[in-house]
Image (tube, rainbow, N blue to C red):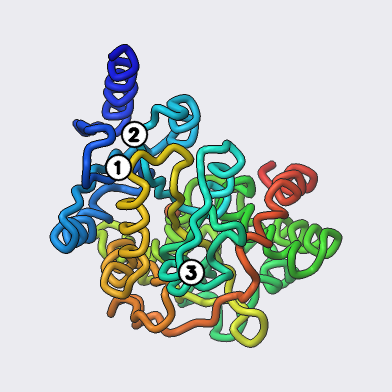
Amino acid sequence: MAQQNALKKALAGLAMIAGVTATFNVNAADEVNIYSDRQAFLLKPILDAFTKETGVKVNIVYAKKGIIQRLKSEGRNSPADLLLTSNVSNLNRAVDAGVTQAVNDSVVNGNVPAQYRDPNGHWFGLTTRARVIYASKDRVKEGEVTRYEDLADPKFKGRICTRPGDHTYNIALLASMIAEYGEADAKAWLEGVKANLARKPQGNDRAQVKAVKEGVCDIAVGNSYYYGKMLENEEQRAWAESVNLIYPNQADRGTHVNISGMTLTESSPNREDAIKLMRFLTESTAQKIYAEQNFEYPVKPGVEASKLIDHWGEFKADKVSLAEVDKYRKRAAMMVNEVGYNR
Ligand code: FE
């Protein structure tokens, strides 16, 4: 009883963070509980379809921050079955925190390509997003910038904008450069990019595209789904329309991508149903809907991206496994400091 009260308290706390009211029925039959730092609206249509098909009810708690810490402090009493989060670094952080367990399921493994899942089965990608280059339509000629490597070319001195170098998205891109080139060359590249910056790194990805629109710089780096988000936003549409979206490195190794993904919690009270949901999320129908909600790409091969994304053209993604890239995460973070990228 005391345990249940503690749990209720913990959940009330979470619900407050999330700004939603959530009631979980711990160990209730035919329910799955999700903790997510992805907004609930992205999932709602898919979860409804899952419930309709299986009779399994799904509860979702959304919290922008602190979800892994929450799982850790709840420990064995956590009602959560699945954690949904973005970026391989967050998924690996959950693994490092000891709040995940391995899943070896032939359906899930069959749907998610090996490069987008943990070799030990602790996490699985659901969607991919590309880290792209946004170049001014007016001031950057077609073909002038086609590779990440170009961003370090002195011809772009004073013409590039990025968000701070220690943000997860930039750390992952730098980690992929280390995986490709080794530390010394990746560092030289980062120094080159820094030397080309138009201003001290600041703001989020969209703020960089805005800066291109306003003439502060000519080239920005950002995630691909923001293009869709900006086009959908009345105020931001002009920012998106001022740039060309360029998928870097199409003639060689391919564009750096990251994932949003899922992991089964160590303490999952509804393990069987949770694995059912994991399977469902990797199947074609859910893949299509989930990816479309946030202008992302399905991980399952052969599932089409949304119409809007299709307009941006097909692209080739870097084949390196994200588990491999993430091994350089810490080194990349140190490198950002070493070159004083944010100064
Ligand atoms: Fe984002």
237 shown above or below 317: above
Give the alpha-carbon distance from disc 1 to disc 2, as whole Å: 7 Å
Binning the other alpha carbons within 10 Å of mark 3 as few (below 14), some (14 to 19) or many (20 upward) gives some
The amino acid pointed to by label 2 is Pro
The amino acid pointed to by label 3 is Asn
Q: Which residue is mark 2?
A: 79
Residue 139 place in picture, x, y as percent: 53, 75
Is label 3 in a helix, a strand or a loop?
helix
At a point 37% along the width and 67% down the height, the residue shown is: 282
The amino acid pointed to by label 1 is Asn
Whether pointer 2 and pointer 3 mark residues with C-beta atoms closer than 8 Å, the reply is no
Q: Which residue is mark 3?
A: 109
Whether pointer 1 and pointer 2 mark residues with C-beta atoms closer than 8 Å, the reply is yes
Is label 2 in a helix, a strand or a loop?
loop
At a point 27% along the width and 43% down the height, the residue shown is: 60
Binning the other alpha carbons within 10 Å of mark 1 as few (below 14), some (14 to 19) or many (20 upward) gives many
Sequence order check: which comes first, mark 2 or mark 3?
2
Residue 243 place in picture, x, y as percent: 44, 72
Query: Is residue 191 shown left or right of residue 47?
Result: right
Q: Which residue is mark 1?
A: 33
